[in-house]
Image (spheres, rainbow, N blue to C red):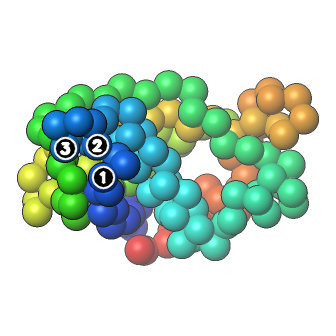
Amino acid sequence: MQKNFSWPIRVYYEDTDVGGVVYHSNYLNFMERARTEWLRALGFEQTAVKDELGVIIVIHSLNIAFKSPAKFNDLLQVNCKLANTGRSSMDIAQTITRDGVLLIEAQVKAVFVNVDTFRPVAVPEAIKQAILQTKL
């Protein structure tokens, strides 16, 4: 059972500060894109999850460690790995690497909430099973 996913991201000039280093908040964007693509690879478009299941996924909390900077034109791998599932949440371990070198390490808690009330709801069973059973 493998619950890992990796998504390539190229660092564009717009992602960097005046020194050519990725601006710290852009790593959050990179991680969000990888989580979205992970869900898509499992067969779940976020718009369909919202429209058909009445659920959206929000970030409850995250912890991020900046190990080494990424720079303009770097090709990065943004990795997602399911660390734990709760009734309404998933803990996701995310890393960003360049040529196998760890740049970013993060722990993200994603919570499933009702689209109208924003109150936590159970992780949809289809999503939970797809993540637990699918080999990517």
Residue pictured at 24% horizontal, 29% vertical: 65
Residue 99 is situated, as x and y percent measured from the top left of the image, at: 11, 63
User: What is the C-alpha distance between the residues marked 1 and 2?
Assistant: 6 Å
| Element class at badge 3 | loop
- Circles 1, 2 touching at the beta carbon (< 8 Å): yes
Instruction: Decide which of 104, 82 is in the foreground and name it.
Output: 104
Secondary structure under tag 1 reads helix
Query: Badge 3: how crowded within 10 Å, few (<14), some, or many (20+)?
Result: some
> Which residue is identified by label 2?
16
Amino acid at pointer 1:
Tyr
**Quarter of the image with the N terminus in it:** bottom left
Instruction: Compare residues 20 and 120 and report the one nearer the observer.
Output: 20
Can the viewer see residue 80 in this picture? yes
Q: Residue furthest right?
A: 116
Whether residue 93 is visible to the viewer of this picture, yes or no, is no
What number is the disc on residue 93? none
Residue 83 sits above or below residue 120 on the image: below
Mark 1 vs 3, N-terminal side: 1
Query: From the viewer's perspective, is residue 35 above or below residue 62?
Result: below
Q: Quadrant of residue 59?
A: top right
When the figure is inspected, residue 39 is found, relative to residue 124, above or below; the finding is below
> In the image, which disc is placed on residue 20?
3
Left or right of 9? Residue 75 is left
- Residue drawn at 20 percent across, 41 percent down: 21
Which residue bears the numbered disc 1?
13
98 w.r.t. 19: above or below: below
In the rendered structure, which amino acid carries the disc numbered 2? Thr
Judge by depth and name the residue closer to the eye, 132 or 60: 60
